[in-house]
Amino acid sequence: MHPLYPPAVIGVFGSGQLGRMLALAARAMGFRIHTFSPEANSPTGQVADSEVCAPYDDLDAVRDFVRQVDVVTFEFENVAAAVAEIA
């Protein structure tokens, strides 16, 4: 593991109010935020630099998302094992 410095890209898997609060704090520190959500214009997506809209079980979309970010965090704990392994 290594430290992450701005302007690194933080990937947020999930897109509710917790993700929004994380995104606002991270952006204030100079980080960029990408979010993955099945719905467009989500609370996190409204303040993110990029929002990927795809079902959580779309493994190809998850792989593409992971390639665009420097680190991934999960906004919720009910993540399929296959998705967690990719991230």
Image (tube, rainbow, N blue to C red):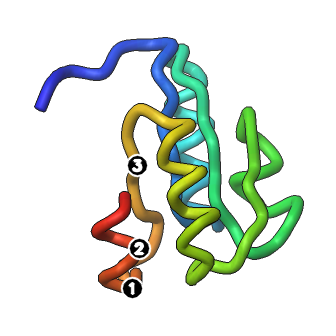
What amino acid type should be assigned to the residue bearing mark 1? Ala
Say which residue appears at 56% left-offset and 37% top-offset. 68
Q: Is residue 84 above or below residue 22?
A: below
Of residue 86 and residue 35, the one placed in the foreground of this image is 86
Q: Residue at x 69, y 79 (%)?
A: 55
- Label 2 belongs to which residue? 83
Estimate the x, y position of residue 24 in percent, counting from the top left: 61, 36
Q: Is residue 1 left or right of residue 72?
A: left
Which element is circle 1 on? loop
Label disc, if present, on residue 11 of the rendered structure: none
Tell me the number on the disc at residue 80.
Answer: 1
Residue where numbered disc 3 is placed:
72
Please tell me how many numbered marks the rendered image carries.
3
Mark 2 and mark 3 lie on one chain; the one further toward the N terminus is 3
Q: Position of residue 32 (x, y in %)?
A: 59, 26
Is residue 42 shown left or right of residue 28? right
Q: Amino acid at mark 3?
A: Val
At x 33% / y 70%, what residue is drawn? 84
Mark whose residue sits in front, 2 or 3: 2
- Answer whether labels 1 and 2 touch (C-beta < 8 Å): yes
Q: Position of residue 13 (x, y in %)?
A: 52, 61
Element under disc 3 = strand
User: From what the image shows, is residue 60 above or below residue 19?
Assistant: below
At label 1, counting other C-alpha atoms closer than 10 Å, the crowd grade (few under 14, some 14-19, many 20 or more) is few
In this view, which residue lies farthest toward the left? Answer: 1
Residues tagged 1 and 3 counted as in contact (Cβ below 8 A): no
Q: CA distance from mark 1 to mark 2?
A: 5 Å
Q: Label 2: few (<14), some or many (≥20) within 10 Å?
A: some
